[in-house]
Amino acid sequence: MREGDDPSAGARSAECMGRAEWLAVVMREANALCDGTAAGPGGAEKLERLAAEAAARVVAAAADPVDFVRHSALHEPKGELWREARTWSDALVAVACACLEHDITEHAGRIASGAVPHVDPGRIV
């Protein structure tokens, strides 16, 4: 190990979330969201709010928020998320939450439209 190398870098890389695990998280949260969201007036706003809450909860519990950015279908998060953050870690968490919220909302939309079947969130591993 060279001077200045981070000895915990190997441990962190072992904790990276693979794409399959990320997809399971998105599917589980989207299906749970569809269970708790009734269609009707204000449904879209409620869906967005609940997706944002779910994303914040999941990212806060994650070992590394980078994984949610790495695997996301949201390739261009809003620049304000980066520019308005006070620290790099705040920016990373904000972008990870935005990416996961986008992915959960997109998958929930596919479930609601019937494009993909609804699955009991407890059965997704």
Image (tube, rainbow, N blue to C red):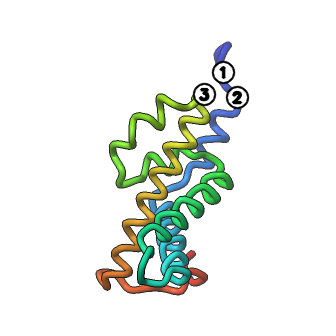
Counting other residues with Cα less than 10 Å from the Cα at mark 1, is it few (<14), some (14-19), or many (20 or more)? few
Q: Which residue is mark 3?
A: 86
Residue 7's label in the rendered image is 2
Q: CA distance from mark 2 to mark 1?
A: 8 Å
Q: Are marks 2 and 1 in contact (CB under 8 Å)?
A: yes
- Whether residue 117 sits left or right of residue 101 in the image: it is left
Q: Quadrant of the N terminus?
A: top right
Q: What residue does disc 1 label?
A: 1
First in sequence: mark 2 or mark 1? 1
Would residue 23 appear left or right of 109 to someone viewing this image? right
Q: Secondary structure at mark 3?
A: loop
Q: Residue at x 63, y 33 (%)?
A: 9
Residue 7 as seen in the image, left or right of residue 94: right
Kindly identify the amino acid type of the residue bearing the numbered disc 2.
Pro
Task: Give above or below for 31 relative to 94.
Answer: below
Instruction: Count how many numbered circles sit on residues in the image.
Output: 3
